[in-house]
Image (spheres, rainbow, N blue to C red):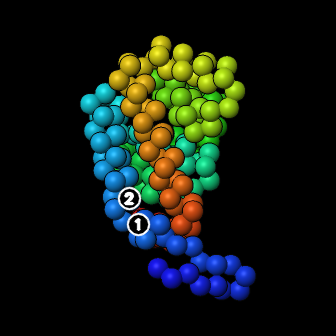
Amino acid sequence: MTTYTTGTAVQRIFIDKQSPDAYQSLVRTSEAVHSVAAEAGLERTLVELINLRVSQINGCAFCLDVHTRAALRAGETTQRLGVLAAWRDTELFTPEERAALALAEVTTVPGDAAVQQAAYDTAREALTDDQVSAVIWVAITINAFNRVSIMSKHPVRRRSLSG
């Protein structure tokens, strides 16, 4: 793709299109991670909640659009999706979901070592070792996709209410 200027902004290169082999490797990694998550017993709705929470933190509009639709298809409710950014302030999420969301957050923004350790310890209490590993891999993978979409400036196009 050739870059060009419109006004003062330079159009971004869609790096997934510019380097398709690298992108397909990421897609294959994502497919493997989804298999690991399913084998570990993580519900598809929880995987999508992780994808959404990480995308919220990273500010990735494209991934938020994709994974909101995926979460709804998986059976997630609009109420829980609407309050996901404030999940700590509700009673709508199970202890396992809360542990997974906290672990995904510290995987995305490691920050303070004590906060990271607390999230990890809580996850170890609420989830199996396979689930802890799967949650971290889901968070790592969506973080990578977020970077692809953010740096490419993938557009979010208006859809109908049903789409």
Q: Label 1: few (<14), some or many (≥20) within 10 Å?
A: few
Does residue 79 sit above or below 120 in this rendering?
A: below
Secondary structure under the numbered disc 2 in the rendered image: helix
The quarter of the image holding the C terminus is bottom left
114 vs 161, nearest the viewer: 114
* Distance between the alpha carbons at the discs numbered 1 and 2: 6 Å
- Give the image quarter of residue 53: top right
55 vs 95, nearest the viewer: 55
Q: Label 2: few (<14), some or many (≥20) within 10 Å?
A: few
Residue 7, percent from left and from top: 71, 86
Residue 108, percent from left and from top: 57, 39
Residue 116, percent from left and from top: 61, 24
Apparent side of residue 23 relative to residue 118 in the rendered image (left or right): left
Task: Residue under label 1, please give it.
Answer: 19
Secondary structure under the numbered disc 1 in the rendered image: loop
* Residue in the image at 58% along x and 22% along y: 119
Q: Inspect the image, locate mark 2, and give the three-letter code of the amino acid beneath it.
A: Ala
* Residue in the image at 35% along x and 23% along y: 130
Task: Residue under label 2, please give it.
Answer: 22
- Give the image quarter of residue 46: top left
* Residue in the image at 47% along x and 41% along y: 140
Q: Is residue 68 visible?
A: no
Q: Are marks 1 and 2 in contact (CB under 8 Å)?
A: yes
* Residue in the image at 43% along x and 39% along y: 138
